[in-house]
Image (cartoon, rainbow, N blue to C red):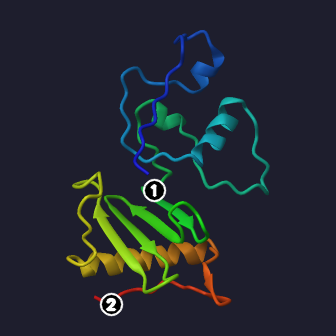
Amino acid sequence: MRVPFITSWVTPSQKNKNQRKIPVGINATQNQIGTVIDIFSTVCELSATEIPEQYITDGFSLKTQFNGKENKKRTNEFINHFPHKHRSSYFTSFIDNDWKIIYHYQIKKGPKYELYNISNDPYETTNLATDNPVKLNEMMVKLEIELTQMEALYPEKNGTPLRLIIPQQ
């Protein structure tokens, strides 16, 4: 999930109306989270396409971030939910600021937890799930709240949804 996103106008020009609408800062660096779901809102803003009111979008326009500024409307939370067969099957990952949890559903055996401080360990080399049960519990509770608010589907085993198992501290 840690992938650089580079943006630039091919030929910067103040005369171009699209470039005035969404300026891209020269040598600007942005560390705030941005995701693939933000592209739709960004393209709609750039093309002056109004998103119908009944159309629910999860993303934010990246306009502010393209200019190197912080988008005050967005949080630093991101959820990646794959409750189905996928290349790394049956998992949900959740980022909340400096922390990331990966929950592997109990398809064949008990659940597996991965917890990383991505600020200190951006390559996720040290799983802190066992060493930091308090943070693990906190992140699992936040993950459960997010999935409930999203009305997310869960994988099933023998017709029964596999809900999250939150370890006690």
Q: Earlier in the sequence, mark 1 or mark 2?
A: 1
Residue at the spot of label 1: 75
Instruction: Between residue 108 and residue 45, name the one nearer to us.
Output: 108
Give the residue type at disc 1.
Answer: Thr
Proximity of marks 1 and 2: CB atoms separated by less than 8 Å: no
Q: Secondary structure at mark 1?
A: loop
Cα distance between the residues tagged 1 and 2 = 27 Å
Residue sitting at the far front: 108
From the top left corner, tell me how far across and down residue 158 is, in percent. 65, 90
From the top left corner, tell me how far across and down residue 29 is, in percent. 36, 32
Q: Which of the labelled discs sits on residue 168, or is there none? A: 2
The image quarter containing residue 75 is bottom left
Mark 1, other Cα within 10 Å: few <14 / some 14–19 / many ≥20: few
Q: Secondary structure at mark 2?
A: loop
Q: Residue at x 40, y 45 (%)?
A: 32
Q: Is residue 116 left or right of residue 36?
A: left
On screen, 77 above or below 42?
Answer: below
From the top left corner, tell me how far across and down residue 155 is, in percent. 60, 78
Mark 2, other Cα within 10 Å: few <14 / some 14–19 / many ≥20: few
